[in-house]
Image (cartoon, rainbow, N blue to C red):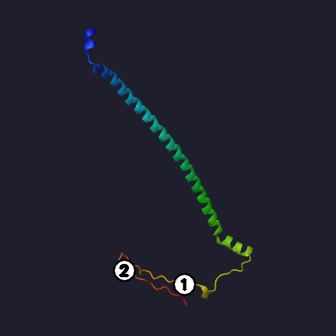
Amino acid sequence: MASNRRSQSGAVRFVPALKAVMLCTLIGGSCVGYVLQKNRIFELGQHLGGRQQKLDKLKKENQDLANRLAALQRPTYLMQRVVDLKLDLGRPAPNQMVWITEYPGTFPTTNGSVSLQYVGRRP
């Protein structure tokens, strides 16, 4: 039996070792790739969570600013500011107003030609 081992070529003895090394490399590489992908997914989740919190904060801030704008545009607030700043403002005279008359049914119902309507001043 010892003489059979000596007569075998070196490549025949080397093939099982090469297979084992290749298999270990494949499994190890797959494991490393899996861990790297899991870490990347975790980092992206953290990034997404931070962006979501920032979005919620900006939405709340936007809503607060919209509420503040609505409060500043109320007629009672505006009249109070006029009085406080002594601006001496009042309602415009009828001859200072521009009246726009709308005629129903003058707009086309298709994408064809556009008809223009006359907008004039009210006497």
Look at discs 1 and 2 and give the one toward the viewer.
Answer: 2
Q: Residues within 10 Å of mark 1 (few under 14, many from 20)?
A: few
Q: What residue type is labelled 1?
A: Trp
Q: In the image as oriented, which residue stretches furthest toward the bottom?
A: 123
x and y, in percent, of residue 3 in the image: 26, 9
Secondary structure category for the residue under label 2: loop
What residue sits 39% from the left and 80% below the top?
114
- Nearest the eye: 5 or 26: 5
The quarter of the image holding the N terminus is top left
Q: Earlier in the sequence, mark 1 or mark 2?
A: 1
Secondary structure category for the residue under label 1: loop
Q: Residues within 10 Å of mark 2 (few under 14, many from 20)?
A: few
The quadrant holding residue 115 is bottom left
x and y, in percent, of residue 90 in the image: 68, 81
The quadrant holding residue 82 is bottom right
What residue sits 42% from the left and 32% below the top?
31
The quadrant holding residue 81 is bottom right
Distance, label 1 to label 2, CA atoms, is: 26 Å
What residue would you read off at disc 1?
99
Q: In this view, does 44 lie to the left or right of 97?
A: left
Q: What residue type is labelled 2?
A: Ser
What residue sits 38% from the left and 78% below the top?
108
What residue would you read off at disc 2?
113
